[in-house]
Amino acid sequence: MIIKIEKIVPEAEITSFPRCDKIRYDLFKTMVIVLLEISTGIIVDQDIKGGKPVIKGTRIPVSFVLDKLSLGLSLEELINEYGLEKDQILNTIKYAAKLLTF
């Protein structure tokens, strides 16, 4: 999961954020955005689909892909109809499987 934290943080405190994949400052270096990836290829961003897990680089929710697969769509149909890659779909399934093991 990617967690997006936005707040004013002194530059010296940046090292205190655990497992940071990306740290980006705005133009005035007053706001920091910290993104944590929860699963390979799956992100959560409050600005995308209200914070629902989505496939990285898209606005396609994990739940949408799982719903389509449960309705019988094949990997090839998802690839052709929604512009996804096979790895993205497989990462979505792996993420769902991880959630079920907890």
Image: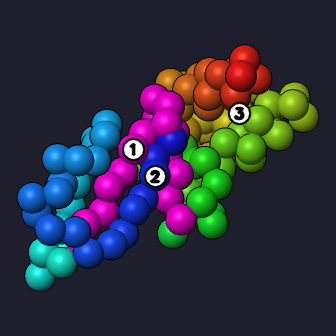
Residue 24 is inside the magenta segment: no
The mark closer to the camera, 3 or 2, is: 2
Q: Locate residue 64 relative to residue 41 in the image: left or right.
A: right
Dot 3 corresponds to which residue?
77
Residue nearer the viewer, 53 or 3: 3
Report the disc number at residue 36.
Answer: 1
Q: Which residues are magenta?
A: 31-46
Residue nearer the viewer, 43 or 71: 43
Which amino acid, by three-letter code, is at mark 2? Ile
Estimate the spatial distance between the alpha carbons at disc 3 and disc 1, rounded to whole Å. 30 Å
Residue farthest right in this picture = 71
Residue nearer the viewer, 77 or 62: 62
Q: Position of residue 86 (x, y in %)?
A: 54, 25
Q: Locate residue 7 relative to residue 76 in the image: left or right.
A: left
Residue drawn at x 51%, y 69% is: 47
Which amino acid, by three-letter code, is at mark 1? Leu
Dot 2 corresponds to which residue?
3
Q: Position of residue 34 (x, y in %)?
A: 32, 55
Residue drawn at x 90%, y 34% is: 71
Q: Position of residue 39 (x, y in %)?
A: 50, 31
The mark closer to the camera, 3 or 1, is: 1
Q: Residues within 10 Å of mark 1 (few under 14, many from 20)?
A: many
Asked whether residue 71 appears in the rendered view, the answer is yes
Estimate the spatial distance between the alpha carbons at disc 1 and disc 2, rounded to whole Å. 5 Å
Marks 1,2: beta carbons within 8 A = yes
Q: Locate residue 73 relative to residue 44 in the image: left or right.
A: right
Residue 34 is inside the magenta segment: yes
16 over 85 or under it: above or below: below
The quarter of the picture where the C terminus appears is: top right
Q: What secondary structure is found at the residue carrying circle 2?
A: loop
